[in-house]
Image (spheres, rainbow, N blue to C red):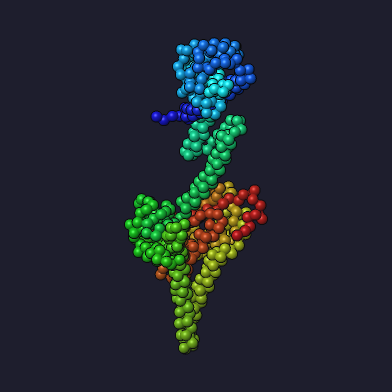
Amino acid sequence: MRLNLFWKFAFAFLALLISVLLAVDYFAERALRADYERAGFDKLTAVARLAQARPPQWPAASPSKPDDLSALQDWVKKMAASGVRITIIAADGRVLAESQSDPLSMENHSNRPEFLEAMAKGDGRSVRQSVTLNREFLYYAVRQNWHGESPVILRFALPSENVSEVLGSFRRRLWVSSFFILLVAGAVSLFMSRSFTGRVERLKEFSRRVAEGDFRPLPRDGSGDALEALGISLNRTASRLDRTIHTLTEERNLSSAILGSMVEGVAVVNGSERLVFANPGFAEILGLDVPPTSGSALVEVVRQTELLEAVRKVLGGEQLVQSEIVTGTLRQHYFAITVAAVSAGDTTGAVVVLHDITELRRLERVRRDFVANVSHELRTPLTAIQGFTETLLAGAIDDPQNRTRFLEIILEHSRRLARLTEDLLMLSKMDAERLELEIRRLSVSQLIESCLETAQHRAADKQLRISVKVPENLPDISGDRRRLAEVLQNLLDNAIQYTLPTGEITLSARTANEEVILTVSDTGIGIPKADQSRIFERFYRVDAARSREAGGTGLGLAIAKHLVEVHGGRLWVDSEVGQGSQFHFSVPLFDPDLSEAAIVSE
Ligand code: ADP
């Protein structure tokens, strides 16, 4: 049976009370009895002294003669007025006189303990049941010498029933009052233990709540006792726990948010080559359909041997291993691997970080290609210049027929070289972001006007017609006049270049949202779809030979696109092979709210 706290307290209290009562009963009875007996014996001793001081008129004859005993009987009766029973016993145990019964009917008293003691020592006492009167008595006996004859014993007795009565009533009162005390104490303890167990239950409930993560504090009960102090300290512990858990949760959330949003792949591997952690980036980089779970073997998750080897090296004792992997087949991605040893507590392992270096590799390739392209572009005019100069020096200078032609070729190639270096210089300025723009309010028609004259000359040579379609109320734009003219010039040059004679070139402009869109359309050869996105790359040409022949550097559109973009616009193309091309570029409208000083920049 499982007793609740209240009943445990109640039983303990009852057991304690009963044990105390029994002990009180026992010791009180002993003390009372001893006290009573001492008082009784004191009285008996006093009476005995009195009796001995006024001894009976002893008959002259021997006490053995019964006739003479009446005098003794009288004395005994007289002395018994003190309330004490008196007996005179001869040395042989015969009762000579007795105050409460007939001495002749009484049996021999030689075996009574008080008699034996008195005979031996002079006085004796005992507490026992009277054989004659069948009651309990306190006996006190003294030896009285008998005028030269054998001594007699004077015995004084008091009934001890009084003590039993007193004890009985004491006991009754003790138990009755104890019963009431028990009732009152029981009620009080019931109330107290109820409230105590209630409070303990509340503490228990509170601990359970805290264990489940509910840290609301326990209200104070105002009792100011140890239980309340316990509650306060539990409250403090709970709030500290709450704060700690809160901080830890925040830290954990922050770390997982950081790791989760990182494009780099991060994974932790333990000493037995099993994954402890992997962020989404890791799964994505390695092309895993399902994110790897903690505990899965690395070899089952990762196929790249370079990565496995790097991890093994670090688990084998190396501090840091760096390597590289390539993923994907059609579109290859390059990742730098950094594997570092990590130890947390007793466990050691490795942290793997995968960093995407595809862009870096692409830029490296672009740079390599660029250098190769530049060298290639430079080589052709330089070789031509060198060749024709050598020919002239070798004697052709004296040949008036070819001399001029050779010199013209040299001039043409040196112009091309100059154009190339100019374009390269422009590109390098743009790359270094050192291109300075003078942003001003510009009228679109004026801008078109400034480019038209030169273009029309060239167009006329090729029997091309250039028409301009610009609405009259076109708002002004903000931009660098020279740079935007360069863009427009370049587009017009290309249109003229890649349009067959008798073709048509149209220059138009329109507003859209917060910008003006200028379009150069031609009815030329057009650009295949596959090349349309690439013509803005440096040195990219759809037909390299044709472009070179025409003196193009392959850099025009790359520069134009960049120039448009630094103005905050876009440059794009729509084209159909054999039908013609439309090159569009947008320029932001002039905003009077922006002061000129603010927009002059870059
Ligand atoms: P290029 O100096 O060769 O003209 P660009 O950068 O100006 O260099 O042009 C890149 C390539 O785009 C050209 O070589 C040409 O193949 C193509 N292209 C440019 N404009 C036109 C156009 N209007 N029609 C057809 N092809 C064009």
**Above/below status of 425 relative to 275:** below
Percent position (x, y) of residue 2?
Answer: 41, 30
Q: How many marks?
A: 0
Q: Say which residue appears at 43% left-offset and 60% top-offset.
A: 348
Quarter assignment of residue 439: bottom right
Quarter assignment of residue 282: bottom left
Q: Say which residue appears at 53% left-offset and 54% top-offset.
A: 569
Percent position (x, y) of residue 29?
Answer: 53, 23
| Pick the front one: 131 or 216 | 131
| Quarter placement of the N terminus | top left
Residue 13 visible in the picture: no
| Quarter placement of the C terminus | bottom right
**Above/below status of 87 relative to 362:** above
Percent position (x, y) of residue 45?
Answer: 60, 22
| Pick the front one: 51 or 369 | 51
| Pick the front one: 398 or 337 | 337
